Image: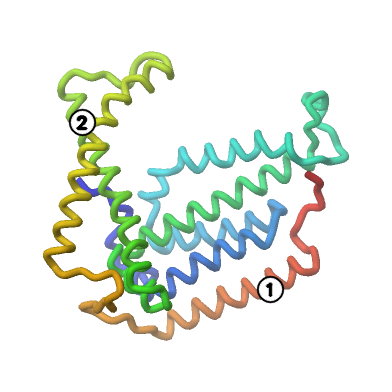
Amino acid sequence: MNVSLYLNHETWVHRLDGRTKTLVVLGFFGLALCFSHPTYLLGILALVVGGLVAAQAGMNVKKIWVLATLLVCYSMMLWPFFVEGETPVPIFHVLGVTWEGCVFGFGMGVRLLIMVLGGVWLLSTTTIEELAQASQELGMPARGGFAFSLAFRWVGILMGAGVGVIQAQRSRGLDISSGTIVERIRKYVPLVVPLIGHALRQTNLLAMALESKGFHPTAQRSFHRTGKMKRTDWVVMVVVGLLLGVSCWMRWHGIGTLDVRF
């Protein structure tokens, strides 16, 4: 079983060139790093959510909403203890928690959420082969592009293997949904052994397949289809480039950042 986030929908986002989608995601990351104030970050988050809606990727968002929620919550809980401010929170003033630290923690949580959802948007609209081709066309060496695509491919393979192992153990009577948290963690330990064995076996098969096909890390790869930039690609790249340029200018002038001390 291979768990993949790619959704085969006929949307204008899916029809964008792989280079465009890769650069757009990098643009999302750059926009998120330009600001620390939650108001501005929420605006960028709305832009990313709009991209997910256009790509009809709601199914994948449902898969990771727990992780996304935990990232925001952890950020809001941890950052206030490391950021100094002037307005203490009445309940936690003994611990040194301030409203400025809470706002900053929320902003960092939204920043992480932007990056996670941006990655989901890319993987929902782009196949692994398209990512490998886009990375090489953007100037990445062939072996770097191969490693890049293989990393994404192996994530899906291992996730699928994990699901298969859990289903097999459940069919044999293993109950992993009951008990305390510690007991549940202990029940997952036996599942690691077959998963490691599967990973080693697949790695060996991959190595033999590459050798049989004469794979060489320094060779220039060729693809069945070549990417072609269309008018929509250029429009999207120009819009994202303008947003990134304006955001950098705002960051240079201190707009959209919180004045906090660590």
Q: Is residue 101 above or below residue 188?
A: below
Locate residue 81: give its quadrant.
top right
| Amino acid type assigned to the residue bearing label 2 in the image | Gln
* Protein image colouring: rainbow
Q: Position of residue 105 (x, y in %)?
A: 68, 42
Is 163 positioned to the left or the right of 47 in the image? Answer: left
In the rendered view of the protein, which quadrant contains the N terminus?
Answer: top left
Comes first in the chain, label 1 or label 2 = 2
| Amino acid type assigned to the residue bearing label 1 in the image | Val
Image depth: mark 1 or mark 2 in front: 2
Q: Is residue 233 above or below residue 210?
A: below
Q: Residue at x 56, y 77 (%)?
A: 239
Contact flag, marks 1 and 2 (Cβ < 8 Å):
no
Q: Which residue is mark 2?
A: 167
Q: Secondary structure at mark 2?
A: helix
Q: CA distance from mark 1 to mark 2?
A: 50 Å
Q: Secondary structure at mark 1?
A: helix
Furthest residue to the top? Answer: 179
Q: Residue at x 23, y 19 (%)?
A: 174
In the rendered view of the protein, which quadrant contains the C terminus?
Answer: top right
Q: Residue at x 29, y 43 (%)?
A: 159
Q: Nearer the viewer, residue 200 or 136?
A: 200
Is 50 positioned to the left or the right of 91 in the image? Answer: left
Q: Position of residue 192 (x, y in %)?
A: 29, 31
Q: Position of residue 16 (x, y in %)?
A: 38, 74
Q: Which residue is mark 1?
A: 246
Q: Position of residue 25 (x, y in %)?
A: 49, 65
